[in-house]
Image: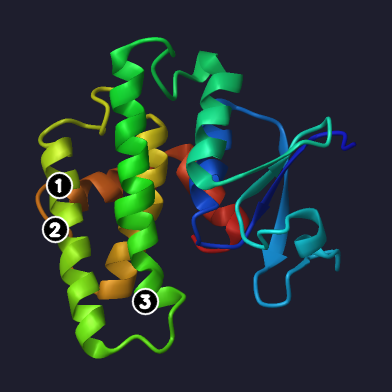
Amino acid sequence: MTETTKLFYTPGVCSLAPHIALREAGATFELVRVDLRSKKTADGDDFARLNPKSYVPALLLPDGTLLTETAVLLNYIADTWPEAKLAPPRGNLVRVRFDEGLHFIATELHKGFAPFTLMPNVSEESKRWAAQRLADRVHLLAEALADRPFLHGEAFSLLDAYAYFALRTYRHLLRVDLPGALGSYLERLSERPAVRAALTAEGIA
């Protein structure tokens, strides 16, 4: 049991997305930093014992339930704090399409970073292939954004929290410019109070 919700995070990685979402939702939570190499928290606790997957993000609820996987945490946050309107209501095709976009970011962008972050022996040819595949996916995201302020239209949503992490990471890893309106979109997201607060809290502002 825990007195408050705890987000286990590592600075700058995918846990940034639910971190931003929690702040956008106005949630009360505690940040627990994790060293992914030692699998220890900042307090020296064994993170691998709490979460056998041994990676972040992980969300520990007050009743002791542990949730993992970025997209799952994001949906949990939206459904737990519906007044923040971070996702459409459930039970209709709009939410299904919204979840489609969320899982596109998870599987086609986020997981596409692995050859550059988690696989040290990847050949240069494979990295070129992976980079082109990512570029194609980023272009699809640019087309989805078009001239709208946010990915779901006029208001910030979970899609933007996840896209912020993905585009920030993509630009950093591949040292490329973002296509279409994505560059100005990323800068605009960077100015949101919740995003600034998350970056500052993680020490990566």
Viewer-side residue, 202 vs 49: 49
Disc 3 is placed on an element classified as helix
Residue at the image position 72 percent from the left and 37 percent from the top: 29
Residue at the image position 70 percent from the left and 60 percent from the top: 33
Residue at the image position 40 percent from the left and 53 percent from the top: 165
> CA gap, disc 3 to disc 2?
16 Å
> What's the residue type where badge 2 is placed?
Asp
Residue under numbered circle 3: 116
Residue 127 visible in the displayed image: yes
Disc 2 is placed on an element classified as helix
> What's the residue type where badge 3 is placed?
Phe
Residue 190, above or below 98: below
165 left or right of 19? left
Disc 1 is placed on an element classified as helix
Residue under numbered circle 2: 136
On the image, the x and y values in percent for residue 45 come to 86, 64
Dot 3: few (<14), some (14–19), or many (≥20) neighbours within 10 Å? some
> CA gap, disc 2 to disc 1?
6 Å
Residue under numbered circle 1: 140
On the image, the x and y values in percent for residue 126 come to 24, 81
> What's the residue type where badge 1 is placed?
Leu
Q: Are marks 2 and 1 in contact (CB under 8 Å)?
A: yes
